[in-house]
Image (cartoon, grey):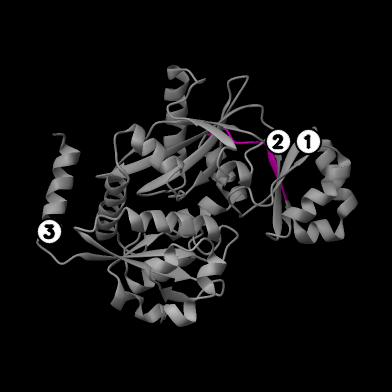
Amino acid sequence: MDISQQRCDIFLGFLKKMKKLRVGIILGGMSSEREVSLNSGRNVYDNLDAEFYEGIPIFMNGEGRLWIISWQLISQNTTVDVSERLKKEARRLSYEDLKTEIDFAFISLHGKYGDDGCIQGLLELLRIPYTGPGILASALGMDKHMQQKILRSAGLDVPDSMIIQEKEWRERKTEVKRKLRDHFAFPFFIKPTREGSSIGVNAIRDEGSLEQGIEEALKWDTAVLAEEYLDGIEFSCIVLEEDGDAKPLDLTEIHPQSEYYTYDDKYMPGRCRKFTPPKNITPEVVVKIKTEVLKAFHALGFRSYGRIDGFLTKKGRILITDPNSSSGMAPSSFFFEQAASAGMLPTMIISTLIRNAITIHKEKQGPL
């Protein structure tokens, strides 16, 4: 038995002597990724170790209100289905009363107000420990422009990019188009600065699609990022921290059906092939990628766990393209696929995340 397993056994033995830890699984939310969040939260709830934890599903609706819901509501297909039944079948929960209902928050929210430091700030004020990194790291994990600045300054390779503010676009459209044409070769990408799951991302193939791409991205944020086109293999790697030591899990190699990794490729069955461990990346390059992944994790101040996405180009460049301060928790997610490759069952990985977070929050001074 290794040291990590011994510590886990000690921790679980300690929990046995106590009453069950009330774990609030916060899901739904106000972002474009609320359906992804529902799937994540449902899977966390289903795989929570009932011997040690009492799972309390907490649904955040589109207005940011919290509701304690039953399994019958978690099992609904969409957040709209859940929302329509809240008043009759759920119990409204004020922010102030959250601490009386739960001891720990498992954040299954994704996107704005979930990954970006907002819910983390609320939990800090209430003194409730939670999964994932703190306020600043969560905010950086959502802001593609700022994270690229930090990663670049830490010596990591990131895509060449240019920020476009909505005000600049509205007032100087012709000038902005000229700057983009001068800086990038077609094709290149336009994306919102603070969105996930490829929401609002468009490949710009010619000047005719440029304006439409920017307008689409501006539906989701007040600034957009223009980014170079990369040709090669996309990858994703979960970093898991345990006892203060962060380690990458097995790398996943991604082959989407579309030209780039779209929302449908990520969540529609059969739209993407994933290989864990990689099929077309040599072991030597995998080691190099994991080194860069770990650098990115630390540079952004991530704690407990994170998902670092990147790109291996045909010329051998290793780029960090999308560091995520959290990860999807659906059954087919990178997290559970890579955990399975490491011999960890879903219940084990969820218990590990809770144990890690409790330890991290006990050691902090001020907000995490």
Q: Quadrant of the C terminus?
A: bottom left
C-alpha distance separating marks 1 and 3: 59 Å
Q: Mark 2 highlights which residue?
A: 228
Image coordinates of residue 175 in percent, x first then y, are 88, 49
Q: Mark 1 highlights which residue?
A: 184
Sequence-first tag of 1 and 2: 1
Q: Is residue 353 above or below residue 338?
A: below
Image coordinates of residue 349 in percent, x first then y, are 31, 46
Q: Quadrant of the N terminus?
A: top left
- Quick one: label 3, few (<14), some, or many (20+) residues within 10 Å? some
Discs 3/2, front: 3
* Residue under the image location 78 percent in, 51 percent down: 214
Q: Quadrant of residue 298?
A: top left
C-alpha distance separating marks 1 and 2: 7 Å
Which residues fall within the magenta stretch?
156-163
Image coordinates of residue 147 in percent, x first then y, are 55, 47
